[in-house]
Image (cartoon, rainbow, N blue to C red):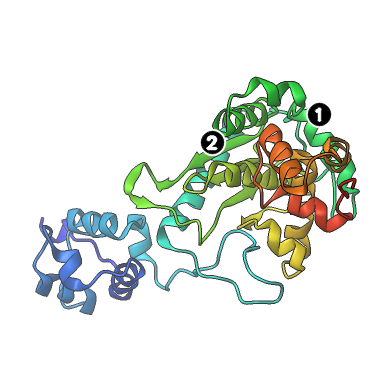
Amino acid sequence: MESMALAHVTPKLLVWARKRVNLTVEAIAHNFADPDRIAAWESGVQVPTFSQAEAFAKKCRVPLLTLFLTDLPTEEIPLTDLRTVKDAGRKKLSNGFREVIDDAIIRQDWYREQFPNAKPRILAKQFTLDSDVTEVAEYLRRTLWINNDLLAQCADWKEYLDRLAQNAEAAGLLVHRSGVVRNDNNRKLNIEEFRGFALVDDVAPLVFVNTNDTTTAQIFTLIHEIVHVCIGREGISNPDPTKAIEGIRNETEDFCNRVTAEVLVPRQKFLRDWQSHYSNTENIKRIVRFNKVSTMAEPLLHLSQTSTPTRNA
């Protein structure tokens, strides 16, 4: 009967799973099994029971069935990586980030099954990189109800972010905002690794925002990822408007950054609100405060596209 309970896992998969989460044999054996026994499983000298294999898989945060594979799983990033400079190598995902993406895909699949006839008002792939930036921005401002009334109703940046997320969900997007992996406060997401990502779908488009960022940065990221949906280009992002000005990011990120800036502070509105009797610094503070954006993000992008309004002598 004992042999019936054995899990004939693949030894090299045990080693792969353990090293994938950067655990030593001693670390994974803690409160679980003797290190020598773990080593024996990995060498194929002994075979764990199913309960032991399940515990091992849980510690390594991989599905149990993975340990029965013949070959090592490929570690391909499931989304286009847009975080790097054009032509640079793709970055490896941390285990926590990979779990977040997996959970988002599962959520998207569930929504698609539950609501197969859902028709988001924000349609995927309705624009391209050749589309006019202003046209895309005006469409999103209308669809997300971004106007002076909304800005005036929001007491601060946090309320504005919440309202934008609510409006996006009302328009048919799945909006996920979190700063940790699977509700574990000990596993925080690193904004240096990513600020957001988008999953494009005709029924269940999804955007994710890393909430460990500043509120103003989250506002920018939310709109940025929604633009990704609109142009049908899903991927992992780390939007940084200053990089767009320097011209060192890829064309997709550059386009999404420019549309986002136009959504949050339309160029014509920016110029119209610029008052000649205020200094440049005072003007920027006024515009930033009312539009609830970042001092670095919005005015900098607009000033890069047009000459700075001059102050009357």
Quarter residue 267 falls in: top right
Amino acid marked by disc 1:
Arg
Q: Is residue 8 visible?
A: yes
Check the image and report above or below for 48 versus 206. below
Type of the residue with mark 2: Trp
Quick check: can you spot residue 232? no
- Which residue: 77% across, 48% down? 280
Instruction: Work out whether 10 lies above or below 60.
Output: below
What is the C-alpha distance between the residues marked 2 and 1? 29 Å
The image shows residue 80, relative to residue 111, as above or below, that is below
Q: Position of residue 160 (x, y in %)?
A: 61, 30
Residue 25 position within the rendered picture, expressed as x and y whole percent measured from the top left: 19, 72
Quadrant in which the N terminus appears: bottom left
Name the residue: 21% across, 79% down: 43
Q: Which mark is residue 232?
A: none
* Location of mark 2 (residue): 110
Q: Along the polypeptide, which appears first: circle 2 or circle 1? A: 2
Which residue is painted at 57% across and 28% down in the image?
Answer: 159
| Label 1 sits on residue | 142
- Residue 140 locus on image (x, y percent): 78, 35
- For the point 75% across and 34% down, which residue is it? 122
Residue 14 in percent (x, y) is at 29, 70
Dot 1: element: helix
